[in-house]
Amino acid sequence: MRMVVILDTGSADLYFDSANSATCQSTGEYSCRGGSFSPDDSSTYQVVDPYPAFDTAFGDGSTAAGPFGEDTVGIGDVRIENVQFGLAQELDITTGYAVGLMGLGYSYIEASYSTYPNIPEVLQSTGVINSRLYSVYLNDLSDISGTILFGGIDPSKYTGDLTTLNILPDIISGGISMFVTTVTDLSITEDGETYNLFSGGSPGIDAYDSYDDALPVLLDTGAAAWSVPISYYTTYIMPFFRFVDDYGLCGCSHRDDDLHLTLTFGGLIPIRVPIADLLVPIYNATTRAPIPYNEDEDTCALLIVPAEPTGYGFQTLGDAILRSMYVVFDLDNGQLSVAQAAEDNDASAGAGRSNPIPVPRGPDGIASALSSAAAEADYVGAVSTQSYSIAPPVTVASETGDLSATTASSTIGTATGTKAVPAGARVSDDGIAGGEGGIDEGNQGSGGYDGDGDGVDDEGDGDAGSSSSSTSSTGDSSSTSSGAAAAVKGTGTVGSDWRDWWVPGIFVLGVGVGMGILI
Protein backbone atom coordinates (compact mmCIF):
# COMPACT_ATOMS: atom_id res chain seq x y z
CA MET A 1 0.00 0.00 0.00
CA ARG A 2 1.34 3.38 -0.94
CA MET A 3 0.73 6.48 1.15
CA VAL A 4 1.92 10.03 1.48
CA VAL A 5 2.44 11.66 4.85
CA ILE A 6 3.01 15.15 6.19
CA LEU A 7 6.55 15.70 7.44
CA ASP A 8 6.15 17.34 10.83
CA THR A 9 9.04 18.54 12.99
CA GLY A 10 6.54 19.57 15.67
CA SER A 11 5.45 16.02 16.56
CA ALA A 12 7.06 12.60 16.83
CA ASP A 13 4.63 9.84 15.77
CA LEU A 14 4.27 8.14 12.41
CA TYR A 15 0.63 7.44 11.71
CA PHE A 16 -1.53 6.38 8.79
CA ASP A 17 -5.21 6.88 8.17
CA SER A 18 -7.17 3.64 8.51
CA ALA A 19 -9.02 2.50 5.40
CA ASN A 20 -11.86 1.43 7.71
CA SER A 21 -12.32 4.86 9.27
CA ALA A 22 -15.46 6.82 8.52
CA THR A 23 -13.30 9.61 7.11
CA CYS A 24 -11.59 7.36 4.59
CA GLN A 25 -14.89 5.74 3.67
CA SER A 26 -16.36 9.15 2.82
CA THR A 27 -16.00 11.09 -0.41
CA GLY A 28 -16.27 14.64 0.91
CA GLU A 29 -13.65 17.32 1.32
CA TYR A 30 -12.35 15.69 4.51
CA SER A 31 -11.81 12.27 2.93
CA CYS A 32 -8.44 10.52 2.90
CA ARG A 33 -6.49 11.69 -0.14
CA GLY A 34 -2.98 10.63 0.85
CA GLY A 35 -3.78 6.94 0.84
CA SER A 36 -5.00 4.73 3.68
CA PHE A 37 -3.81 1.58 5.41
CA SER A 38 -5.89 -1.59 5.54
CA PRO A 39 -4.66 -4.14 8.11
CA ASP A 40 -6.67 -6.86 6.36
CA ASP A 41 -4.52 -6.43 3.26
CA SER A 42 -1.22 -6.95 5.07
CA SER A 43 0.04 -10.37 6.10
CA THR A 44 2.77 -8.85 8.29
CA TYR A 45 0.79 -6.25 10.25
CA GLN A 46 0.53 -6.84 14.00
CA VAL A 47 -1.21 -4.85 16.73
CA VAL A 48 1.23 -3.58 19.36
CA ASP A 49 -1.21 -1.76 21.62
CA PRO A 50 -4.98 -1.75 20.96
CA TYR A 51 -7.26 1.25 20.56
CA PRO A 52 -7.07 3.90 21.92
CA ALA A 53 -3.35 3.65 22.69
CA PHE A 54 -2.68 6.12 19.88
CA ASP A 55 -4.56 9.31 20.71
CA THR A 56 -3.29 12.68 19.60
CA ALA A 57 -4.49 16.23 18.99
CA PHE A 58 -3.03 19.12 17.01
CA GLY A 59 -2.99 22.87 17.22
CA ASP A 60 -5.54 23.28 14.43
CA GLY A 61 -8.09 21.29 16.45
CA SER A 62 -7.75 18.06 14.48
CA THR A 63 -7.56 14.74 16.34
CA ALA A 64 -6.61 11.16 15.50
CA ALA A 65 -7.03 7.99 17.57
CA GLY A 66 -6.61 4.25 17.16
CA PRO A 67 -4.22 1.40 17.98
CA PHE A 68 -0.47 1.19 17.59
CA GLY A 69 0.70 -1.43 15.14
CA GLU A 70 3.84 -2.68 13.42
CA ASP A 71 4.62 -3.54 9.84
CA THR A 72 7.29 -3.27 7.17
CA VAL A 73 7.65 0.30 5.94
CA GLY A 74 9.43 1.45 2.80
CA ILE A 75 10.78 4.97 2.33
CA GLY A 76 12.41 5.60 -1.02
CA ASP A 77 14.52 2.50 -1.58
CA VAL A 78 14.89 1.63 2.12
CA ARG A 79 12.76 -1.20 3.49
CA ILE A 80 12.48 -1.45 7.30
CA GLU A 81 10.83 -4.27 9.21
CA ASN A 82 8.87 -3.96 12.48
CA VAL A 83 8.28 -0.22 12.38
CA GLN A 84 5.73 1.00 14.93
CA PHE A 85 3.05 3.47 13.88
CA GLY A 86 -0.36 4.73 14.88
CA LEU A 87 -3.41 3.69 12.88
CA ALA A 88 -5.99 6.48 12.90
CA GLN A 89 -9.36 4.74 13.06
CA GLU A 90 -11.07 7.89 14.30
CA LEU A 91 -10.27 11.16 12.54
CA ASP A 92 -11.59 14.64 13.13
CA ILE A 93 -9.97 16.83 10.50
CA THR A 94 -10.46 20.59 10.53
CA THR A 95 -8.24 21.78 7.68
CA GLY A 96 -9.17 19.80 4.58
CA TYR A 97 -8.23 16.40 3.24
CA ALA A 98 -7.05 13.74 5.66
CA VAL A 99 -3.49 12.56 5.13
CA GLY A 100 -1.12 10.67 7.43
CA LEU A 101 1.82 12.15 9.26
CA MET A 102 5.47 11.42 9.92
CA GLY A 103 6.56 13.15 13.11
CA LEU A 104 10.28 13.86 13.17
CA GLY A 105 10.64 15.31 16.65
CA TYR A 106 12.02 13.76 19.82
CA SER A 107 10.27 10.52 20.77
CA TYR A 108 9.80 12.13 24.19
CA ILE A 109 6.73 13.93 22.78
CA GLU A 110 5.10 10.85 21.21
CA ALA A 111 1.38 10.30 21.72
CA SER A 112 2.07 7.10 23.62
CA TYR A 113 2.17 5.95 27.24
CA SER A 114 5.66 4.59 26.62
CA THR A 115 8.11 5.85 24.02
CA TYR A 116 9.14 3.79 21.02
CA PRO A 117 11.73 4.30 18.24
CA ASN A 118 10.37 6.82 15.76
CA ILE A 119 11.61 7.32 12.21
CA PRO A 120 14.85 9.26 12.93
CA GLU A 121 15.75 6.65 15.56
CA VAL A 122 14.79 3.74 13.32
CA LEU A 123 16.97 5.04 10.50
CA GLN A 124 19.89 5.57 12.88
CA SER A 125 19.61 2.30 14.78
CA THR A 126 19.42 0.25 11.57
CA GLY A 127 22.53 1.92 10.16
CA VAL A 128 20.84 3.83 7.37
CA ILE A 129 22.18 7.09 8.85
CA ASN A 130 24.94 7.80 11.36
CA SER A 131 23.07 9.99 13.82
CA ARG A 132 19.63 11.38 14.61
CA LEU A 133 20.01 14.29 12.23
CA TYR A 134 18.25 15.53 9.11
CA SER A 135 18.17 18.71 7.06
CA VAL A 136 15.19 20.37 5.41
CA TYR A 137 15.05 22.56 2.30
CA LEU A 138 11.50 23.53 1.38
CA ASN A 139 12.24 25.88 -1.53
CA ASP A 140 10.02 28.83 -2.38
CA LEU A 141 6.46 28.93 -3.68
CA SER A 142 7.54 29.42 -7.28
CA ASP A 143 9.22 26.00 -7.37
CA ILE A 144 7.84 22.49 -7.04
CA SER A 145 10.84 20.85 -5.39
CA GLY A 146 12.26 20.54 -1.93
CA THR A 147 14.28 18.00 0.02
CA ILE A 148 14.62 16.34 3.37
CA LEU A 149 18.03 14.78 3.86
CA PHE A 150 18.28 12.15 6.60
CA GLY A 151 21.74 11.86 8.13
CA GLY A 152 23.45 14.60 6.18
CA ILE A 153 23.65 18.12 4.80
CA ASP A 154 23.75 19.51 1.27
CA PRO A 155 25.78 22.74 0.86
CA SER A 156 24.21 23.33 -2.55
CA LYS A 157 20.91 24.09 -0.82
CA TYR A 158 22.11 27.11 1.16
CA THR A 159 24.18 30.26 0.79
CA GLY A 160 26.54 31.92 3.25
CA ASP A 161 27.37 30.46 6.63
CA LEU A 162 25.68 27.44 8.17
CA THR A 163 25.40 28.52 11.80
CA THR A 164 24.72 26.18 14.71
CA LEU A 165 22.43 27.25 17.55
CA ASN A 166 21.60 25.47 20.78
CA ILE A 167 17.95 24.47 21.15
CA LEU A 168 16.14 26.09 24.06
CA PRO A 169 15.04 23.74 26.85
CA ASP A 170 11.42 23.15 27.74
CA ILE A 171 10.33 25.68 30.36
CA ILE A 172 8.60 22.96 32.38
CA SER A 173 10.92 19.94 32.22
CA GLY A 174 14.14 21.88 31.72
CA GLY A 175 15.29 19.44 29.05
CA ILE A 176 15.60 19.50 25.26
CA SER A 177 12.50 17.98 23.69
CA MET A 178 11.34 20.31 20.87
CA PHE A 179 13.04 22.41 18.19
CA VAL A 180 12.74 25.79 19.90
CA THR A 181 15.07 28.70 19.17
CA THR A 182 14.76 32.50 19.34
CA VAL A 183 14.07 35.33 16.94
CA THR A 184 16.27 37.98 18.53
CA ASP A 185 15.95 40.69 15.89
CA LEU A 186 13.34 41.65 13.30
CA SER A 187 13.50 44.27 10.56
CA ILE A 188 11.41 45.13 7.52
CA THR A 189 12.78 46.61 4.32
CA GLU A 190 10.24 48.53 2.26
CA ASP A 191 11.12 50.34 -0.98
CA GLY A 192 14.80 50.12 -0.13
CA GLU A 193 14.53 51.56 3.38
CA THR A 194 15.06 49.29 6.39
CA TYR A 195 13.14 49.67 9.64
CA ASN A 196 14.42 47.88 12.76
CA LEU A 197 11.38 46.63 14.65
CA PHE A 198 13.09 45.00 17.63
CA SER A 199 16.62 43.86 18.40
CA GLY A 200 18.92 42.72 21.15
CA GLY A 201 16.73 39.95 22.46
CA SER A 202 18.26 37.11 24.44
CA PRO A 203 19.44 34.11 22.40
CA GLY A 204 19.10 31.82 25.41
CA ILE A 205 16.63 30.78 28.06
CA ASP A 206 16.08 34.38 29.16
CA ALA A 207 14.01 34.77 25.99
CA TYR A 208 11.16 33.09 27.87
CA ASP A 209 10.97 36.17 30.11
CA SER A 210 7.99 38.28 29.11
CA TYR A 211 10.14 41.41 29.41
CA ASP A 212 12.69 40.16 26.88
CA ASP A 213 12.35 41.37 23.28
CA ALA A 214 13.28 37.98 21.80
CA LEU A 215 10.53 35.70 20.54
CA PRO A 216 10.94 31.96 21.28
CA VAL A 217 9.71 29.95 18.28
CA LEU A 218 9.19 26.30 17.43
CA LEU A 219 10.52 25.49 13.95
CA ASP A 220 7.59 23.43 12.68
CA THR A 221 7.32 22.11 9.12
CA GLY A 222 3.81 20.98 9.98
CA ALA A 223 2.60 24.58 10.25
CA ALA A 224 1.88 26.95 7.40
CA ALA A 225 2.05 30.32 9.15
CA TRP A 226 4.30 32.19 11.51
CA SER A 227 2.23 32.74 14.66
CA VAL A 228 3.20 35.81 16.68
CA PRO A 229 1.84 37.29 19.90
CA ILE A 230 -1.03 39.70 19.33
CA SER A 231 1.07 42.59 20.66
CA TYR A 232 3.82 41.85 18.11
CA TYR A 233 1.28 41.64 15.32
CA THR A 234 -0.33 44.98 16.08
CA THR A 235 2.94 46.77 16.85
CA TYR A 236 5.30 45.38 14.21
CA ILE A 237 3.34 43.68 11.43
CA MET A 238 0.18 45.69 10.83
CA PRO A 239 1.92 49.05 10.16
CA PHE A 240 3.85 47.56 7.23
CA PHE A 241 1.10 45.27 5.95
CA ARG A 242 -1.53 47.99 6.02
CA PHE A 243 -2.99 46.63 2.76
CA VAL A 244 -4.06 43.45 4.64
CA ASP A 245 -7.65 43.61 5.87
CA ASP A 246 -9.07 42.51 9.22
CA TYR A 247 -9.44 38.94 7.92
CA GLY A 248 -5.76 38.67 7.01
CA LEU A 249 -6.52 38.95 3.28
CA CYS A 250 -5.38 41.24 0.49
CA GLY A 251 -5.03 41.45 -3.27
CA CYS A 252 -2.37 39.16 -4.72
CA SER A 253 -0.72 42.04 -6.58
CA HIS A 254 1.06 42.85 -3.31
CA ARG A 255 3.21 39.75 -3.78
CA ASP A 256 5.24 41.95 -6.14
CA ASP A 257 5.75 44.75 -3.61
CA ASP A 258 9.29 45.79 -2.74
CA LEU A 259 9.19 44.45 0.81
CA HIS A 260 10.95 41.74 2.76
CA LEU A 261 11.51 40.72 6.37
CA THR A 262 14.83 39.90 8.01
CA LEU A 263 14.68 37.65 11.06
CA THR A 264 17.82 37.02 13.11
CA PHE A 265 17.93 33.68 14.92
CA GLY A 266 19.87 33.23 18.14
CA GLY A 267 21.52 36.62 17.65
CA LEU A 268 23.75 35.10 14.99
CA ILE A 269 22.12 34.27 11.67
CA PRO A 270 19.91 36.70 9.68
CA ILE A 271 17.35 35.20 7.29
CA ARG A 272 15.76 37.25 4.50
CA VAL A 273 12.11 36.38 3.77
CA PRO A 274 10.47 37.79 0.60
CA ILE A 275 6.90 39.02 0.71
CA ALA A 276 5.94 36.55 -2.02
CA ASP A 277 6.40 33.69 0.48
CA LEU A 278 4.25 35.46 3.07
CA LEU A 279 1.27 36.12 0.78
CA VAL A 280 -0.34 33.03 -0.73
CA PRO A 281 -3.34 32.68 -3.09
CA ILE A 282 -6.50 31.00 -1.86
CA TYR A 283 -9.15 29.18 -3.86
CA ASN A 284 -12.80 28.26 -3.73
CA ALA A 285 -12.96 24.65 -2.50
CA THR A 286 -16.02 23.88 -4.60
CA THR A 287 -15.22 25.56 -7.91
CA ARG A 288 -11.41 25.33 -7.52
CA ALA A 289 -11.17 28.83 -8.92
CA PRO A 290 -9.19 31.70 -7.41
CA ILE A 291 -11.26 33.84 -5.09
CA PRO A 292 -11.48 37.41 -6.43
CA TYR A 293 -10.47 40.15 -4.02
CA ASN A 294 -11.70 42.94 -6.24
CA GLU A 295 -12.40 43.45 -9.93
CA ASP A 296 -8.73 43.36 -10.86
CA GLU A 297 -7.02 40.71 -8.75
CA ASP A 298 -7.33 37.50 -6.78
CA THR A 299 -7.27 37.03 -3.02
CA CYS A 300 -4.12 36.25 -1.07
CA ALA A 301 -3.72 35.50 2.64
CA LEU A 302 -0.96 36.76 4.91
CA LEU A 303 0.83 33.88 6.63
CA ILE A 304 1.82 35.90 9.65
CA VAL A 305 -1.01 35.53 12.12
CA PRO A 306 -1.75 36.83 15.63
CA ALA A 307 -2.01 34.09 18.23
CA GLU A 308 -2.83 33.65 21.88
CA PRO A 309 -0.11 32.34 24.24
CA THR A 310 0.45 28.60 23.87
CA GLY A 311 1.29 27.89 27.49
CA TYR A 312 4.67 26.49 26.44
CA GLY A 313 6.48 29.82 26.23
CA PHE A 314 6.91 29.78 22.45
CA GLN A 315 4.99 30.45 19.25
CA THR A 316 5.05 28.39 16.04
CA LEU A 317 7.20 29.37 13.09
CA GLY A 318 5.98 27.51 10.02
CA ASP A 319 6.72 27.16 6.35
CA ALA A 320 6.08 30.80 5.44
CA ILE A 321 9.45 31.53 7.07
CA LEU A 322 11.09 28.09 6.80
CA ARG A 323 11.02 28.30 3.00
CA SER A 324 13.75 30.91 3.25
CA MET A 325 15.82 28.77 5.61
CA TYR A 326 18.01 25.71 5.30
CA VAL A 327 17.73 23.95 8.66
CA VAL A 328 19.63 20.99 10.08
CA PHE A 329 17.69 19.36 12.91
CA ASP A 330 20.27 17.63 15.15
CA LEU A 331 18.46 15.55 17.75
CA ASP A 332 21.60 13.90 19.12
CA ASN A 333 23.29 17.18 20.02
CA GLY A 334 20.22 19.28 20.81
CA GLN A 335 21.08 21.84 18.16
CA LEU A 336 19.80 23.53 15.01
CA SER A 337 22.08 24.63 12.19
CA VAL A 338 20.61 27.41 10.07
CA ALA A 339 21.52 29.14 6.80
CA GLN A 340 19.83 31.22 4.13
CA ALA A 341 18.18 28.86 1.67
CA ALA A 342 19.49 28.90 -1.88
CA GLU A 343 17.24 30.56 -4.43
CA ASP A 344 16.13 29.35 -7.86
CA ASN A 345 17.00 25.77 -7.03
CA ASP A 346 14.26 24.01 -8.95
CA ALA A 347 13.92 20.25 -9.31
CA SER A 348 16.19 19.80 -12.32
CA ALA A 349 18.80 22.34 -11.29
CA GLY A 350 18.87 21.09 -7.72
CA ALA A 351 19.38 17.51 -8.79
CA GLY A 352 22.38 18.54 -10.86
CA ARG A 353 24.04 20.56 -8.10
CA SER A 354 23.12 18.38 -5.15
CA ASN A 355 26.09 17.25 -3.07
CA PRO A 356 24.92 15.40 0.06
CA ILE A 357 27.53 14.99 2.78
CA PRO A 358 27.06 12.33 5.49
CA VAL A 359 27.40 13.66 9.03
CA PRO A 360 29.22 11.44 11.56
CA ARG A 361 28.05 11.04 15.13
CA GLY A 362 29.31 13.31 17.87
CA PRO A 363 29.21 16.98 18.86
CA ASP A 364 31.58 17.94 16.04
CA GLY A 365 29.78 15.93 13.37
CA ILE A 366 28.71 18.83 11.15
CA ALA A 367 32.05 20.62 11.42
CA SER A 368 33.85 17.37 10.62
CA ALA A 369 31.62 16.65 7.64
CA LEU A 370 32.07 20.10 6.12
CA SER A 371 35.79 20.12 6.83
CA SER A 372 36.25 16.81 5.05
CA ALA A 373 34.36 18.28 2.12
CA ALA A 374 36.69 21.30 2.03
CA ALA A 375 33.75 23.54 2.86
CA GLU A 376 34.73 24.61 6.37
CA ALA A 377 34.44 28.29 5.46
CA ASP A 378 30.70 27.82 5.18
CA TYR A 379 30.27 26.74 8.80
CA VAL A 380 30.04 28.72 12.03
CA GLY A 381 29.97 26.61 15.17
CA ALA A 382 27.69 27.06 18.14
CA VAL A 383 28.67 29.38 20.97
CA SER A 384 29.02 26.27 23.13
CA THR A 385 27.88 22.68 23.24
CA GLN A 386 24.40 22.02 24.56
CA SER A 387 24.40 22.27 28.35
CA TYR A 388 20.83 21.12 28.97
CA SER A 389 19.80 17.49 29.08
CA ILE A 390 18.76 16.10 25.70
CA ALA A 391 15.93 13.62 25.27
CA PRO A 392 17.75 10.32 24.65
CA PRO A 393 17.00 7.96 21.76
CA VAL A 394 14.68 5.03 22.26
CA THR A 395 16.55 1.88 21.32
CA VAL A 396 14.30 -0.90 22.61
CA ALA A 397 13.49 -3.70 20.18
CA SER A 398 10.05 -3.81 18.62
CA GLU A 399 7.27 -5.92 20.06
CA THR A 400 7.51 -8.49 17.29
CA GLY A 401 11.17 -8.53 16.31
CA ASP A 402 14.32 -6.52 15.80
CA LEU A 403 14.35 -3.53 13.53
CA SER A 404 16.19 -4.21 10.30
CA ALA A 405 16.70 -2.27 7.08
CA THR A 406 17.44 -3.49 3.59
CA THR A 407 17.68 -1.88 0.18
CA ALA A 408 14.50 -2.47 -1.79
CA SER A 409 14.68 -3.77 -5.34
CA SER A 410 12.58 -0.85 -6.54
CA THR A 411 11.81 2.59 -5.20
CA ILE A 412 8.45 4.16 -4.61
CA GLY A 413 9.07 6.49 -7.52
CA THR A 414 9.40 10.12 -8.39
CA ALA A 415 6.60 12.63 -8.26
CA THR A 416 5.37 14.32 -11.38
CA GLY A 417 5.05 17.72 -9.77
CA THR A 418 1.68 19.43 -9.80
CA LYS A 419 0.19 16.54 -11.78
CA ALA A 420 0.69 14.36 -8.71
CA VAL A 421 -2.11 16.00 -6.77
CA PRO A 422 -5.35 13.99 -6.56
CA ALA A 423 -7.66 14.80 -9.44
CA GLY A 424 -10.37 15.82 -7.00
CA ALA A 425 -8.10 18.39 -5.41
CA ARG A 426 -6.65 20.08 -8.47
CA VAL A 427 -7.39 23.71 -9.09
CA SER A 428 -7.40 22.89 -12.82
CA ASP A 429 -6.50 19.97 -15.05
CA ASP A 430 -2.96 21.24 -15.16
CA GLY A 431 -2.68 22.15 -11.50
CA ILE A 432 -0.91 25.37 -10.62
CA ALA A 433 2.33 25.96 -12.46
CA GLY A 434 5.08 25.91 -9.90
CA GLY A 435 2.65 25.42 -7.04
CA GLU A 436 0.86 27.91 -4.88
CA GLY A 437 0.50 28.43 -1.19
CA GLY A 438 -2.43 28.23 1.14
CA ILE A 439 -3.81 29.58 4.35
CA ASP A 440 -4.12 28.13 7.80
CA GLU A 441 -3.71 29.84 11.10
CA GLY A 442 -3.24 26.76 13.26
CA ASN A 443 -0.34 24.54 14.13
CA GLN A 444 -0.56 21.77 11.58
CA GLY A 445 0.59 18.21 11.46
CA SER A 446 -2.83 16.69 11.75
CA GLY A 447 -3.60 15.12 8.45
CA GLY A 448 -5.39 18.05 6.88
CA TYR A 449 -3.94 20.06 4.04
CA ASP A 450 -2.71 23.33 5.41
CA GLY A 451 -1.11 25.17 2.54
CA ASP A 452 2.41 24.31 3.58
CA GLY A 453 3.36 21.75 0.96
CA ASP A 454 1.75 18.65 2.38
CA GLY A 455 1.88 15.53 0.26
CA VAL A 456 -0.96 13.68 -1.34
CA ASP A 457 -1.33 10.39 -3.16
CA ASP A 458 -1.45 10.98 -6.89
CA GLU A 459 -4.72 9.08 -7.26
CA GLY A 460 -6.03 9.67 -3.77
CA ASP A 461 -6.55 5.98 -3.15
CA GLY A 462 -3.18 4.73 -1.94
CA ASP A 463 -3.87 1.34 -3.47
CA ALA A 464 -0.85 0.87 -5.71
CA GLY A 465 0.80 -2.50 -5.24
CA SER A 466 0.51 -4.98 -2.41
CA SER A 467 1.05 -4.46 1.28
CA SER A 468 4.43 -4.67 2.99
CA SER A 469 6.32 -5.61 -0.13
CA SER A 470 9.02 -3.44 -1.60
CA THR A 471 9.70 -5.80 -4.48
CA SER A 472 6.23 -5.70 -5.98
CA SER A 473 4.78 -2.71 -4.26
CA THR A 474 4.86 0.08 -6.73
CA GLY A 475 3.35 -1.69 -9.67
CA ASP A 476 3.19 0.63 -12.62
CA SER A 477 2.89 3.77 -10.54
CA SER A 478 6.24 5.45 -10.83
CA SER A 479 4.58 8.65 -9.71
CA THR A 480 4.17 9.19 -6.00
CA SER A 481 3.03 12.59 -4.95
CA SER A 482 4.51 14.99 -2.51
CA GLY A 483 1.92 17.65 -2.86
CA ALA A 484 0.83 20.13 -5.46
CA ALA A 485 -1.40 23.15 -5.66
CA ALA A 486 -4.87 22.26 -4.54
CA ALA A 487 -8.15 23.89 -3.62
CA VAL A 488 -9.34 22.35 -0.40
CA LYS A 489 -11.40 24.29 2.08
CA GLY A 490 -9.90 27.47 0.75
CA THR A 491 -6.35 26.22 1.01
CA GLY A 492 -3.65 25.30 -1.44
CA THR A 493 -0.61 23.10 -1.21
CA VAL A 494 2.75 23.48 -2.79
CA GLY A 495 3.92 20.79 -5.17
CA SER A 496 7.24 19.06 -4.98
CA ASP A 497 8.99 16.87 -7.48
CA TRP A 498 10.98 14.57 -5.27
CA ARG A 499 13.86 12.26 -6.01
CA ASP A 500 15.31 9.61 -3.72
CA TRP A 501 18.50 7.67 -3.28
CA TRP A 502 20.39 5.91 -0.51
CA VAL A 503 24.15 5.87 0.01
CA PRO A 504 26.03 4.73 3.14
CA GLY A 505 25.43 7.04 6.05
CA ILE A 506 22.92 9.28 4.35
CA PHE A 507 19.35 9.03 3.15
CA VAL A 508 17.77 11.61 0.90
CA LEU A 509 14.23 12.37 -0.13
CA GLY A 510 13.12 15.47 -1.96
CA VAL A 511 9.90 16.93 -0.62
CA GLY A 512 7.62 19.91 -0.39
CA VAL A 513 6.64 18.92 3.10
CA GLY A 514 4.96 15.69 2.09
CA MET A 515 6.74 12.41 1.48
CA GLY A 516 5.70 9.14 -0.11
CA ILE A 517 6.16 5.93 1.82
CA LEU A 518 5.27 2.32 1.20
CA ILE A 519 3.82 -0.21 3.62
Image (cartoon, helix red, strand yellow):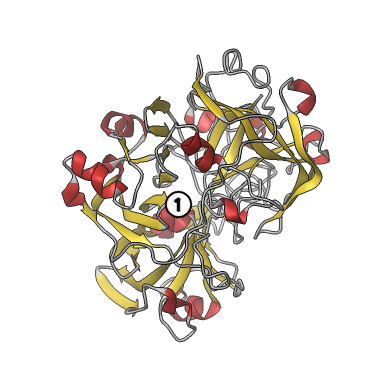
Mark 1: which secondary structure? loop
The residue lying at 27 percent from left, 40 percent from top is: 156
Residue receiving disc 1 = 331
Measured as percent of width and height from the top left, residue 39 is found at 77, 28
**In the rendered image, is residue 276 in sight?**
yes
> In front: 501, or 193?
501
> In front: 240, or 516?
516
Residue 81 against residue 389 in the figure, above or below: above
Measured as percent of width and height from the top left, residue 179 is found at 48, 59
Measured as percent of width and height from the top left, residue 217 is found at 47, 66
Q: Would you call the spot at circle 1 few (<14 residues within 10 Å), some (14-19), or many (20 or more)? A: many
> In front: 4, or 174?
174
**In the rendered image, is residue 427 in sight?**
no
**The N terminus - image quarter:** top right
The residue lying at 61 percent from left, 56 percent from top is: 109
Which image quadrant for residue 306?
bottom right
Left/right placement of residue 108 relative to residue 40 reads: left
**The C terminus - image quarter:** top right
Which image quadrant for residue 401?
top right
Which image quadrant for residue 500?
top left
